[in-house]
Image (cartoon, rainbow, N blue to C red):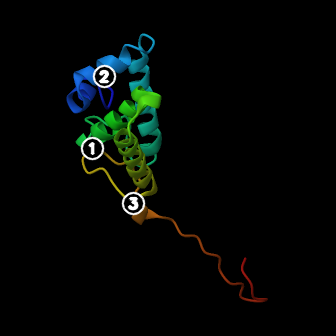
Amino acid sequence: MPYATRADLEFRYGTEEVALRESVLPAGALDRILQSVDAEIDAYLAGRYAIPLSPAPENVVNFAAAIARYRLLGEAASDHARTEYEDARAFLRDVQAGRARLDAAATVSGASPSEAVVATGRRRVFGGGLL
């Protein structure tokens, strides 16, 4: 199931906006956009969370809708649509880097930043330096 659906876009941005923009695009364009948004989100989250997220946290649905809207609008995107898009991608980059997290999603074992492995060399007993 996609993170954002046509119904999510219509609820957030209006049926008229979605239908108007979709009318100038090739058939199936919205479905392809939604699929590419899912793939992008999964790429950001793959190392930290079990993907696909099911159920998806509400903020992921919001971010997916913002990214999909921006792509749907293309060159007709407003500054507000661009800001929502950039904010969504920034948050996803923060999740990927471990600076933010998704509370309702199942993490991948060993993905916690607190479980980092640190390797150190040991000193030689004779002759100094590291092994």
Label 2 neighbourhood size at 10 Å, few (<14), some (14-19), many (20+)?
A: some
Q: Label 2 belongs to which residue? A: 18
Which quadrant: the N terminus? top left
- Amino acid type, callout 2: Val
Q: Which mark is residue 99?
A: 3
- Amino acid type, callout 3: Arg
Between discs 2 and 3, the one toward the N terminus: 2
Residue projecting furthest to the top: 27
Q: Residue at x 38, y 42 (%)?
A: 79
Separation of residues labelled 2 and 1 (CA atoms): 20 Å
Q: Residue at x 72, y 80 (%)?
A: 130
Between 52 and 35, which is closer to the camera in this rendering? 35
Q: Label 1 belongs to which residue? A: 59
- Indicate the position of residue 124 as horizontal and vertical percent values: 72, 84
Question: Dot 3: what SS?
Answer: loop
Q: Quadrant of residue 51?
A: top left
Q: Is residue 64 left or right of residue 121?
A: left
Between 20 and 1, which is closer to the camera in this rendering? 20
- Amino acid type, callout 1: Asn
Residue projecting furthest to the left: 11
Between 36 and 75, which is closer to the camera in this rendering? 75
Residue projecting furthest to the right: 127
Q: Quadrant of residue 98?
A: bottom left
